[in-house]
């Protein structure tokens, strides 16, 4: 039986190793031949060969056809179609691998006439250390006569492939990092690719070719079509084929790559670095990474970024210009490599690195503060996670609980469902490591939109509106009953709560309550420790549930709004369809009214209500969410510190008035404009505060002073981007020195990196030249930073006022003699007021 279906390919990075591997794995489960046809190029591939699939050069938006022939064709069609619909969700991490162009050079480098090699910023951070220069890896062999018969060479190849597969599987078993596991899984799929294996054996069978040479030739044959791909991401998969090929050749007695031994803390300089070599490095000694010819989306760089290793790519020929052991600075945020830095350059970067560390520490410190508004309103800030391994990161970022644990991720990519003991182990770990913090565990949210190998589900035209979430529990009672048994047992060990997805009717939650009670009775009868009175909550993601919250509140303990689904259902706009994505906007007044209805109804019944959708992490929308009176916001752990910092600057009463006003408007754009105006009003902070005053600066030059003034603004919470502020200072200096004379400079600038006018002051421990008109050294700097926009024009008068006062001897003397920051603030405020 033959079936087929057409679709438009959706992944931004094209069909590369990971999605091709997933397609291959799914296709291999069925007794059927699967063909992938790219209708744009006419390329056709075996659907059970990831390498052949990659070779179709399938790009985003390409029209494609899947043709399936065999006894299991209908089942294969259903599973493959569901997989293709869900790939964008699986591949969301690819977005973080975009190239970062180098910004302008720090002026200190031009002032010092430093030698600088510019590349692309591939991993932020500043490090300094000796260069460890690595020679190029040996190329894949294509020549070499056989030492044995073709049958013996094939046997050797199979033994080598099995041995390498064992090595990769051993490494996989030891890896907990999801990024590194994904890379290893992609490599395993290449090694086991049936088209690759068949090509190697065909080359051997043709005669006069060793197994090692056949691997090299096959690797080149599969790499060749990738080299002409329009997608850099797909071209960079050549490195993965070379990596596997090189390791196979080494197993077959061919030349192996040189071991990379980092004698001490070093910055590794290489042409490229295969993922396997990166994983083999002693990363405690790897300070930074410079790859001359690697692509930004190479698996090595994806893994290095995940580990926070500063990295630069795109510096061809750099190895020939550096000596082994040469002292270099690597600026991963700007994409710069600076060999043999001068004392001034070294000092500048030492200070940059110190401020980066201080900013990170301050961010973590703010993240650990309670979720409170400026006027004391409590809002719990929690994390969304999908694996117990993510708990440590959540707590480190300051999460006050877990608002959503996605249990369905435990089911993905498995031939069978996890048993009760395996699930109990995972949930028990959550409970034990909670430290008293609440953990909300969502029961399996699966269905036609999340296909599972072991769970046969009917084909649905629109799985998002079909049998998913709570709707499948009755048909698959053993699956949910096993999960509930494990959850109730684990809840006896810590503060776990249970949340049910996709509730639309009262009957569904009543059925779920009865199921939980029945499972608790089973555990009690078996004498197993458990918690029968565990809190039970529900997701509000279906409009019918949103309008019946008051009735549901009589049967559940809490609510959590899943804004992603609620938005698309409320506006009848598929969030995965770019043509209608703009319709479902969370700031639309209609949606704000719906959210207010949900929260008010829950509070009237004494129930708390959280928000775990994508908008919960939006700093821009936070005033509206606070104004709508949500009790909890749950988000990606990395965004917790930023949301908490913004929360502490908001007034709950003002936010409530904003939400009331926004809900009364009629268009999303009107709400956006009101939000921007609210942000400007909130930014009207005092011009100068003690945190913007430094009485003893150790800056030794204009470059260091401007650097430190920008850092002062960042530490005071007046900017999130000190480098943009520093750039604004230098732009003004380029039109003429701000050295006023009398030992005073008035550095100033205009930038979108600040939200309010800021005035600050620094006194220098040792005066230095500033190119002032009177050529006198400067020991005092008074800065003025103005935000971009028309509103800032009125504040330019402040500069004139400052200048007029500074020319008076008594004012300068008072600033120089001020005993503390508070006195400086009073002096400057009086000067500006006058």
Image (cartoon, helix red, strand yellow):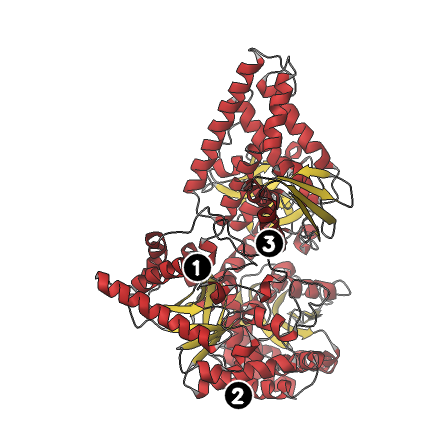
Q: CA distance from mark 3 to mark 1?
A: 19 Å
Residue 284 vertical placement versus 627 (above, below): above
The quarter of the picture where residue 656 lies is bottom right
Query: In the rendered view of the protein, which quadrant contains the N terminus?
Result: top right
Mark toward the viewer: 1 or 2: 1
Q: Residues within 10 Å of mark 3 (few under 14, many from 20)?
A: many
Front residue (pair 703, 677): 677
Q: Circle 1 is placed at which residue position?
A: 476
Task: Residue 775: give x, y in percent of width and height.
Answer: 70, 64
Of label 3 and label 2, which has the lower sequence position? 3
Task: Residue 434: give x, y in percent of width and height.
Answer: 35, 64
Residue drawn at the location 27% of the way across and 67% of the way down:
521
Of label 3 and label 1, which has the lower sequence position? 3
Task: Residue 182: give x, y in percent of width and height.
Answer: 53, 45
Which type of secondary structure does the marked residue at label 1 adopt? loop
Residue drawn at the location 49% of the way across and 86% of the way down:
601
Q: CA distance from mark 3 to mark 2?
A: 46 Å
Query: In the rendered view of the protein, which quadrant contains the C terminus?
Result: bottom right
Q: Is residue 683 left or right of residue 455?
A: right
The quarter of the picture where residue 554 lies is bottom left
Front residue (pair 409, 625): 409
Q: Circle 2 is placed at which residue position?
A: 653
Q: Is residue 206 visible?
A: yes
Q: Residues within 10 Å of mark 2 (few under 14, many from 20)?
A: some
Which residue of the protein is positioned furthest toward the left in this rendering? 527
Which type of secondary structure does the marked residue at label 3 adopt? helix
Residue 783 vertical placement versus 826 (above, below): above
Mark toward the viewer: 3 or 1: 1
Of label 1 and label 2, which has the lower sequence position? 1
Which type of secondary structure does the marked residue at label 2 adopt? helix
């Amino acid at each position: 039986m033959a079936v087929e279906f057409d679709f438009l390919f959706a992944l931004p990075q094209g069909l590369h190793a990971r999605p091709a591997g997933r397609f291959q794995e799914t296709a291999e489960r069925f007794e059927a031949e699967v063909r992938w046809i790219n209708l744009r190029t006419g390329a056709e591939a075996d659907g059970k060969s990831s390498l052949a699939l990659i070779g179709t050069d399938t790009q985003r938006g390409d029209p494609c056809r899947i043709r399936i022939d065999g006894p299991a064709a209908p089942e294969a069609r259903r599973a493959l179609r569901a997989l293709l619909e869900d790939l964008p969700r699986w591949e969301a991490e690819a977005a973080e691998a975009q190239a970062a162009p180098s910004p302008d050079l720090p002026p200190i480098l031009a002032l010092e006439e430093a030698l600088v090699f510019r590349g692309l910023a591939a991993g932020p951070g500043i490090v300094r250390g000796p260069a460890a220069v690595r020679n190029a890896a040996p190329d894949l062999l294509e020549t070499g006569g056989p030492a044995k018969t073709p049958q013996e060479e094939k046997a050797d190849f199979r033994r080598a492939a099995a041995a390498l597969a064992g090595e990769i599987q051993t490494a996989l078993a030891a890896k907990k990092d999801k990024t590194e596991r994904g890379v290893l899984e992609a490599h395993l799929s290449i090694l086991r690719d049936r088209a690759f294996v068949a090509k190697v054996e065909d080359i051997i069978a043709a005669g006069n070719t060793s197994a090692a040479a056949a691997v090299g030739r096959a690797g080149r044959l599969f790499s060749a079509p990738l080299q002409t791909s329009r997608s850099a991401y797909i071209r960079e998969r050549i490195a993965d084929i070379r990596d596997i090929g090189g390791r196979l050749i080494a197993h077959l007695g061919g030349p192996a790559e040189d071991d990379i031994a980092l004698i001490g803390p070093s910055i590794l300089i290489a042409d490229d670095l295969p993922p396997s070599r990166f994983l083999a490095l002693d990363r405690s000694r790897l300070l930074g990474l410079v790859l001359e010819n690697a692509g930004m989306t190479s698996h090595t760089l994806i893994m290095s970024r995940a580990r926070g290793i500063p990295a630069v790519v795109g510096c061809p020929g750099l190895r020939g210009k550096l000596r082994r052991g040469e002292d270099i600075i690597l600026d991963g945020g700007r994409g710069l490599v600076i060999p043999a830095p001068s004392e001034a350059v070294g000092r500048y970067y030492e200070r940059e690195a110190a401020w980066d560390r201080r900013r990170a520490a301050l961010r973590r410190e703010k993240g650990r503060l309670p979720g409170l508004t400026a006027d004391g309103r409590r809002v719990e800030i929690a994390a969304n996670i999908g694996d117990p391994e993510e708990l440590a990161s959540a707590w480190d970022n300051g999460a006050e609980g877990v608002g959503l644990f996605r249990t369905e991720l435990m089911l993905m990519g498995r031939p069978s469902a996890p048993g009760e003991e395996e699930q109990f182990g995972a949930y028990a770990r959550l409970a034990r490591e909670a430290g008293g913090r609440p953990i909300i565990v969502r029961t399996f949210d699966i269905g036609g939109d999340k296909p599972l190998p072991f769970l046969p589900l009917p084909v649905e035209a629109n799985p998002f509106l079909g049998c998913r979430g709570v709707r499948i529990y009755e048909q698959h009672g053993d699956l949910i009953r096993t999960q509930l048994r494990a959850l109730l047992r684990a809840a006896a060990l810590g503060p776990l709560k249970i949340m049910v997805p996709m509730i639309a009717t009262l009957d569904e939650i009543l059925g779920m309550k009865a199921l939980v009670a029945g499972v608790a009775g089973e555990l009690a009868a078996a004498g197993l420790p458990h918690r029968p009175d565990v809190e039970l909550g529900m997701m509000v993601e279906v409009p019918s549930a949103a309008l019946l919250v008051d009735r549901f509140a009589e049967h559940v303990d809490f609510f959590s709004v899943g804004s992603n689904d609620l938005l698309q259902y409320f506006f009848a706009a598929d969030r995965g369809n770019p043509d209608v994505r703009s319709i479902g906007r969370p700031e639309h007044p209609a949606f704000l009214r719906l959210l207010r209805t949900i929260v008010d109804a829950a509070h009237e019944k004494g129930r708390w209500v959280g928000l775990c959708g994508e908008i919960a992490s939006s700093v821009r929308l936070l005033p509206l969410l606070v104004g709508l009176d949500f009790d909890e916001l749950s988000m990606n752990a990395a965004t917790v510190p930023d949301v908490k910092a913004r929360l502490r600057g908001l007034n709950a009463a003002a936010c409530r008035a904003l939400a009331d006003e926004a809900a009364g408007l009629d268009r999303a754009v009107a709400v956006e404009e009101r939000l921007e105006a609210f942000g400007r009003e909130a930014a009207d902070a005092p011009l100068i505060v003690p945190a913007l005053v430094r009485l003893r600066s150790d800056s030794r030059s204009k470059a260091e002073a401007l650097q430190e003034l920008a850092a002062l603004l960042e530490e005071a919470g007046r900017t999130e981007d000190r480098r943009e502020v520093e750039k604004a200072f230098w732009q003004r200096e380029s039109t003429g020195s701000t050295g006023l004379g009398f030992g005073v400079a008035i550095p100033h600038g205009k930038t979108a990196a600040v939200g309010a006018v800021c005035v600050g002051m620094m006194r220098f421990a040792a005066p230095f030249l500033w190119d002032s008109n009177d050529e006198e050294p400067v020991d005092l700097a008074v800065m003025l930073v103005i935000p971009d926009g028309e509103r800032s024009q009125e504040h330019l008068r402040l500069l004139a006022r400052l200048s007029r006062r500074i020319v008076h001897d008594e004012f300068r003397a008072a600033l120089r003699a001020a005993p503390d920051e508070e006195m400086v603030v009073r002096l400057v405020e009086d000067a500006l007021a006058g």
